[in-house]
Image (spheres, helix red, strand yellow):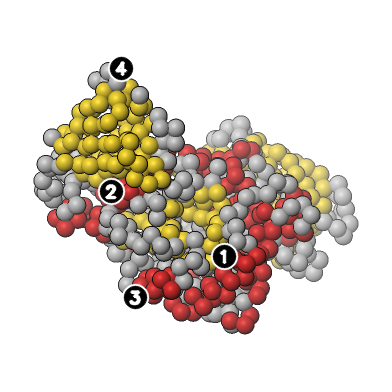
Amino acid sequence: MTDIVINTSNIVHPVSPMLYGIFFEDINYGGDGGLYGELIANRSFEYYEREVNPPAHAEGAPDIQTMCWETLNGCRFTIGKRFPLSKAHSNYAHLSGEAGSGLRNLGFCGEGLAVREGQAFRFSCYARNPLPMKLTVRFADKSGDLYGSKTFSLVRCGHGWSRYRLTLTATGSCRQVYPEILLESEGTLDLDLISLFPEDTFLSRENGMRRDIAEMLQALHPAFMRFPGGCIVEGRSFDNMYRWKDTIGPLSERPTNWNRWQMEEYQLDGRSSADYFQSYGLGYYEYFLFCEDIGAKPVPVMNAGMTCQWHEALLADMNELDPWIEDILDLIEFANGSEDTPLGRKRAEMGHPAPFGLEYIGIGNEQWGQVYFERYEAFEKILSEKHPEIKLITCAGWTAEGEDFDTAYRWMEANRNRAYAVDEHFYKSPQWFLENIRRYDGYDRSLPKVFAGEYAAHTHEDTSKRVCNWFAALCEAAFLTGVEKNSDHVVMSCYAPLLGRTGRQQWQPDLIWFDNESVYGTPSYYVQLLFGNNLGASLVETSLAEDTAAEPAASASQATAISPAALAGGAIQTSSTLSEDGKTLYVKLVNLADRNLEVTLKTDRPVSACRRFTLAADPEDVNSHAKPRRVSPVEDTLPGIHPAGTKDLPLCLKRYSVTVLACTLI
Ligand code: AHR
């Protein structure tokens, strides 16, 4: 029996209210083809040959601008360029054919979309037609069966573009249909920005997010969202860098950028990601709005005048950093400026007169070395002078130890006040997470605070063999108890990456997986959910008199065996926090042992009720589309609590489990 003694009257330190957040990057088709509700791939015919070799597009393959589209019934389809919709949308579809000819969109990754009977979709397109004509838009499966159809007239004729919108309702349910656009009679026309959204996007917003994925994110109650990357912020070339101004304003004025993740070998079976682009339909306005919708503070990461250091590592000259610094000044105006400022007015015109309340900005993603810090200093000098209210986040490189990491800390020792926080990234083995539970205990509190901006326990060195199992999640949970204990200094944290399209990922593990029909959280997702939703405002003194020998599991396979070194810190890891009003005590208990452990929780104040959430599974267990909640929390009420209050709470911690208690204190 182990006693866990909690003294709520001894507050150790305040807990950062920003401790648990999310990190969104458009990787694994997480943005276009994922969270962003658009269902048409290559909607503006703007896919293009990337400038970084090797070429994405195989020789002899159809024109890259027509990628994701197929012709139907002899339609003649070419890419028009002479009279474009806008500078940013310089291509369009030029079609001619007989009645019944037209185009089919293959959807993201060629997977079309799933429809439910009665589900309504918003279809829209720009059209230009010399003569009046009719079009039909419909859902058809590969065998030609129809799941909804609507015919509409293109009444406006001539040289200009006209926008048409309609609602298309599915007449049946099908796992994979394709949107088709057909000419009703022989004719010629131009089409551009062909778009299809489910009507029931998250909060029913137009140009909104896919509801089921967004709700999974909302359920985490993330304190912040770091976005839009990740490596896509840096890009692989100057043209490929993420420039936020490309992503605001009308969709018809947002250019397309290739997604640098299309260059990563597709991890599971070598399929190409050459169709992976950023439409920027999910842009900075949408990111800010989504943050507001889910109650998360926005934490944009801005380019530091450098492309990805893993690859080309191109550098903007030190004398030519102004455009990148101005980009950040402008972003602050767009987010926070009054309607009297040009960019504040732009925000208002887009539909949000009130400021978005931007407080944090990351300068660079995962950068390292002298080349980074000299650039950071140039950015910081101007930004801190013009916007001392903004908290700047610097980088500690690509991993949380070693020469590059030490260089970052040496820079911070010499520049203690030049960053609010430093962004540490660690993709490490589960054992590493256990061995590092006390990592932050000795951190110098006079240095910038820590933002654990990307982390995940990787079960294998080979990406394709990594799994999102309970063992990884359990080790992350144990590590997070150490983070909570140091949450005066580790002020923000987020798992990475967030989203993966099943079978089309460039990176794994990911926190949440989705396909066209469903979405599920990994065991790590449920750890994040329990930890983030049960967090108090102050850390309280907790001591553990453990008599449990922390022996390695006899039954565990090699992959999930916890080493003696990792267990040296004890089989039970715990942290306790008290709510701001002092009425709720949150206790997290992680049992790393291969057997159930009996413990008694001894609290200085009586507990009158206690909700318990238990996550327990075999180390190798995973969730899947078929079994989305195989590893998920079970909620119950702790039995045996006297209504007048109980100070000793006996409980059993299941083998390999996370238990989270929310105790009402008298
Ligand atoms: O999260 C995936 C990638 O890992 C990020 O884009 C990058 O910052 C890191 O290398």
For disc 4, the neighbor class at 10 Å (few under 14, some 14 to 19, many from 20) is few
Circle number at residue 644: 4
From the viewer's perspective, is 95 left or right of 59? right
Image location of residue 561, percent across then percent down? 18, 53
Image location of residue 551, percent across then percent down? 11, 49
* Mark 2 in CB contact with mark 1 (< 8 angstroms): no
For disc 3, the neighbor class at 10 Å (few under 14, some 14 to 19, many from 20) is few
For disc 1, the neighbor class at 10 Å (few under 14, some 14 to 19, many from 20) is many
Q: Which residue: 54% across, 66% down?
A: 363
Image location of residue 89, percent across then percent down? 72, 63
Label located before the other in sequence (2 or 1): 1
Q: Which residue: 44% across, 77% down?
A: 369
Residue 576 occupies quadrant: top left
Mark 2, mark 4: which one is toward the viewer? 4
Badge 1 amino acid: Met
Label located before the other in sequence (3 or 4): 3
Badge 2 amino acid: Ala
Instruction: Determine the CA span between mark 2 and mark 4.
Output: 33 Å
Label located before the other in sequence (3 or 1): 1
Instruction: Determine the CA span between mark 4 and mark 1.
Output: 54 Å
Q: Which residue: 35% across, 72% down?
A: 406
Residue with the mark numbered 2: 478
Label located before the other in sequence (2 or 3): 3
Instruction: Determine the CA span between mark 2 and mark 3.
Output: 27 Å
Residue with the mark numbered 1: 302
Residue with the mark numbered 3: 403
Residue 489 occupies quadrant: bottom left
Taking depth in this image into account, of 156 and 588 the one nearest to the observer is 588
| Res. 623 visible in picture | no
From the viewer's perspective, is 20 left or right of 542? right
Q: Which residue: 31% across, 51% down?
A: 482
Instruction: Determine the CA span between mark 3 and mark 4.
Output: 57 Å
